[in-house]
Each structure stands twice: as structure tokens, then as C-alpha cells.
């Protein structure tokens, strides 16, 4: 949806350029014709550090857009900035109180800056005009076809924040025979801002207490549903493990559950993850080797070797917006030598073998579908790719997908490098 109906401004806008960048992007964006958002303009992205004192403010938008509501996501997709017209549209004034798990940022005089943090944006997204199912279907097809997902070796994926419209669109595309991708959607429990619709579970709880979390997870676990819990720190990871320990006591053979991010986990909790049968989904993959994460090594650790050595089930996830080139191989290239050494093998060869399993069979195991997909075996779905080299040797850098098959049919072929197989 972001690619089709929202304005892309990159992430380097400043106080002096953000409004003009949105205006320029508006001229070339399909959102000019996409009226399902009404007169709202939605742009992506801003980075707080590019603004004076690290603070985004509506005043940088108001002169250019005095009457039209504007919403800009920040690069994390957890926070948004509104101009004054947007604040007025949703009825937010100086007296608005921050919800649990969220905050309305304020100037020194108490007036709103327009920046809404975490759960504070939920009400805004829920109030936006929603697209028809036909538009959501177009967006899904775009994500699969136009971004050339098969070209980059992607034949299956997890959706971390599906909603009602998304599920209807998937069902219709599947019935029409147009869903050339194996998709496993997760339904947002909290916060509502990610599902962009009202929760039918507990509208009061945006930041879940221990008991609320335990109640929700116990219910979903009893139904055999895999839960993906996002944990961006060792404290939040420990809280999740404490809850899961209680859940496993009541249902020892329940489904695998996932901890998304796992960028930092206390050493004492790694063994607990193995004992509790928890998948460590290491994400966002694009952060595994960037200048941003290298500046904060105490926060962005991703202990691949320690987790694998302890027997934790490990996968890699994108957990991010759709990039122009959603390739499989940049992330493995960055981490391939982080799995240690073995006698007779280089670190790259050790990592190559482990990563090849992580991006195939381990992903299928995480969603309980290892008997149907994830490896080439008789009776399994014929979803696989052919590449130009032996990835098990760890040579991910520069690797190219030559062909991709989905359910036995060739879905993509590199016509510039045709090979017989």
C-alpha cells in the first residue's frame, strides 16, 4: 500500500526540505488518483535526528499544507508526524492525554508538536478512510509481481500485521488463482496502529500488562496459533519468556512461538529460549550490517552463534517496508561469518550451511509447515529457486537467482542468463 498510494520522500528530509519533498512527491504519486484516503496525504519517511534538537514539528509542514491533512511516518514506522490540519481533523488539541503505551510530543509551552509516538497513532490510523478490497488486492499483486519478489528468490513470507481487509484480499486472490506466493499472516493484537483498524480484543490495552499478555497468549496457544511477539531489548525479551514459561506449564506441547527482532538477549535467557521452544526471528535483516547499527553494538547484537549453539530455532526476518530490491542475499552476506569455526571448514562455509537452512526449512518449521514446504522432497510443495552458485559454501555476496518455481510452475526466469536444468 505504501508503494502504490503513499508518497516516498526517502529518509533524509530536514526541517527546510520535508514539505517541499512531499509536494514534489505528490506530483508523481499514484495517491493523486487514489481517493480512498480522502484528501489525506501520507508520506514516508522522516528521521528525527535530521531536525533541530532531534524533534520533528508540525510547523515544518504547515506553511506548505495549511488546510490539507498530512501524515508522515518516521523511519521505524512506530511513530508519525501530523500537520495542524491533520490534528484538527482527528480532534487532537493541547488537552489530549497520551494513551497507555503512547505519547503526544509537546513543545515547551505545552502545545502539540504533531509527533505521535507508538500507540498514540492508533486512533489516527483507525479513523483514516479505508481502501476497498480491490485496492488491497492490487497492492498484494504489486508486492509479488511488480517488485519482482520471485526474481529475488522469495516464494513465501510472513505478514507481521495483517488486518481484516488484508485477509479478505488474500482469500479472494487465492480463490481467483492469482496468489503466487505462500503467505502466513499474523493478526495484530496490540498496538492497533499496526493493524490500522480497531481491535476486537481489548480496546483499552495498548501496552499489555503481564496478566493481559498471559491471558491473550494462553488463549491463542490453546487454539494452536503461532504468536509473533516483537521484542527490541533484553528486558522485553525476558518479560515474554516469563509469560511463555507459564503458558508452557499449562500446554507443554503447544505450537512454536516467535520472538521478533532478538537484537539483544541476556545470556541467561538464551538457554530458556531453547527450553521453551521459541523461534528467534532475527530482524530487521537490513540492519544486520549498516552504519546505523554499528554505532550501537550494545543494542544491536543478534547473537546468532550463541542461539544456534544452545539449540534455539533461528530464522531471519525482514520486518520492514518493501524495499526496491527485496533480495534474500544481502543479509546472509553480512552475517555469514558469525557462526563460528569447525575443523576443516572456513567460517564462511560453516555459516553458509547454517544460513541455507535458516532461509528455507527453518522458516517452514517456524509456521508449522515443515511437512509441506521448506525443502525439496517428495510430497512437498514445489516452491524453490535455482541460483548461480552453491550457497552452502557461504558465497552469498552477488548471488543471483536464475529461476523460481511456485507450486511446480516456473514463476520467473532470468532471460539474460538462461541455463538448461
Image (spheres, rainbow, N blue to C red):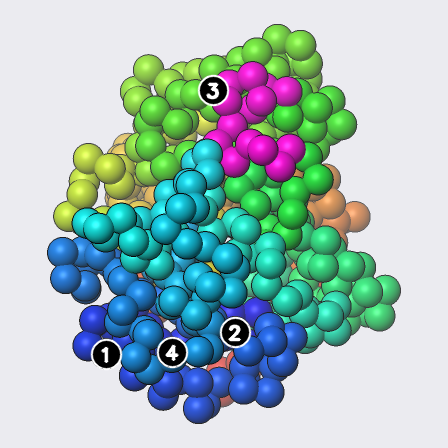
Q: Nearer the viewer, residue 110 or 138?
A: 110
Dot 1 or dot 2, earlier in sequence: 1
Where residue 136 appears, x then y in whole percent? 68, 69
Q: Indicate which label's residue lies in the foreground, 4 or 2.
A: 4
- Residue at the location (52% across, 59% down)? 90
Marker disc for residue 40: 2
> Which residue is identified by label 4?
66
Circles 3 and 2, Cβ within 8 Å, touching? The answer is no
| Measured Cα–Cα span from mark 4 to mark 2 | 13 Å
Name the residue rendered at 14%, 56% in the picture.
53
Query: Distance between the Cα atoms at labels 3 and 1?
Result: 44 Å
Mark linked to residue 17:
1
Residue 283 in magenta? Answer: no
Answer whether residue 28 is visible to the viewer in this image. Answer: yes
- Report the magenta residues as a range: 202-215
Q: Which residue is mark 3?
A: 241
Q: Position of residue 11 (x, y in %)?
A: 29, 68
Q: Is residue 362 above or below residue 251?
A: below
Residue 211 covered by magenta stretch: yes
Residue 350 in percent (x, y) is at 34, 41
Which label's residue is closer to the chain start, 4 or 1?
A: 1
Say what secondary structure mark 3 lies in: helix
* Residue 234 tag number: none
Q: How far apart are labels 3 and 2 at the CA level?
A: 41 Å
Element under label 4? loop
Amino acid at each position: 500500500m505504501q508503494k502504490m498510494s503513499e508518497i516516498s520522500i526517502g529518509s533524509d528530509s530536514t526541517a527546510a526540505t520535508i514539505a517541499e519533498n512531499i509536494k514534489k512527491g505528490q506530483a508523481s504519486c499514484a495517491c493523486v488518483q487514489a481517493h480512498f484516503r480522502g484528501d489525506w496525504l501520507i508520506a514516508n519517511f522522516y528521521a528525527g535526528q535530521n531536525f533541530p534538537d532531534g524533534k520533528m514539528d508540525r510547523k515544518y509542514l504547515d506553511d506548505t499544507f495549511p488546510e490539507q491533512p498530512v501524515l508522515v511516518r518516521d523511519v521505524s514506522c512506530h511513530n508519525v508526524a501530523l500537520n495542524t490540519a491533520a490534528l484538527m481533523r482527528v480532534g487532537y488539541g493541547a488537552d489530549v492525554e497520551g494513551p497507555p503505551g503512547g505519547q503526544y510530543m509537546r513543545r515547551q509551552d505545552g502545545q502539540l508538536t504533531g509527533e505521535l509516538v507508538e500507540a498514540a497513532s492508533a486512533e489516527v490510523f483507525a479513523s483514516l478512510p479505508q481502501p476497498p478490497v480491490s485496492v488491497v488486492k492490487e497492492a498484494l499483486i504489486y508486492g509479488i509481481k511488480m517488485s519482482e519478489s520471485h526474481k529475488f528468490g522469495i516464494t513465501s513470507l510472513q505478514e507481521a500485521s495483517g488486518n481484516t481487509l488484508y485477509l479478505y484480499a488474500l482469500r479472494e486472490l487465492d480463490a481467483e488463482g492469482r496468489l503466487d506466493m505462500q503467505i502466513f499472516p499474523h493478526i495484530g493484537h496490540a498496538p492497533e496502529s499496526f493493524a490500522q483498524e480497531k481491535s476486537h480484543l481489548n480496546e483499552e490495552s495498548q501496552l499489555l500488562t503481564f496478566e493481559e499478555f498471559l491471558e491473550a497468549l494462553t488463549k491463542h496457544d490453546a487454539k494452536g496459533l503461532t504468536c509473533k511477539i516483537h521484542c527490541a531489548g533484553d528486558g522485553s525479551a525476558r518479560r515474554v519468556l516469563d509469560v511463555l514459561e507459564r503458558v508452557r506449564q499449562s500446554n507443554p506441547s503447544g505450537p512454536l512461538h516467535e520472538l521478533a527482532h532478538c537484537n539483544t538477549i541476556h545470556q541467561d535467557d538464551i538457554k530458556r529460549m531453547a527450553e521453551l521452544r521459541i523461534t528467534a526471528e532475527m530482524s530487521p535483516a537490513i540492519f544486520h550490517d549498516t552504519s546505523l547499527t554499528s554505532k550501537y553494538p550494545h543494542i544491536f547484537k543478534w547473537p546468532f552463534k550463541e542461539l544456534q549453539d544452545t539449540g534455539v530455532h533461528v530464522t531471519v526476518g525482514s520486518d520492514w517496508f518493501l524495499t526496491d530490491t527485496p533480495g534474500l542475499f544481502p543479509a546472509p552476506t553480512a552475517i555469514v561469518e558469525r557462526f563460528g569455526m569447525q575443523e576443516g571448514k572456513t567460517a564462511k562455509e560453516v555459516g553458509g550451511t547454517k544460513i541455507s537452512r535458516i532461509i528455507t526449512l527453518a522458516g517452514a518449521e517456524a509456521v508449522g509447515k515443515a511437512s509441506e514446504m521448506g525443502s525439496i522432497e517428495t510430497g512437498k510443495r514445489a516452491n524453490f529457486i535455482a541460483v548461480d552458485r552453491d550457497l552452502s559454501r557461504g558465497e552469498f555476496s552477488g548471488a543471483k537467482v536464475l529461476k523460481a518455481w511456485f507450486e511446480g510452475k516456473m514463476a520467473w526466469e532470468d532471460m539474460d542468463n538462461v541455463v538448461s536444468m
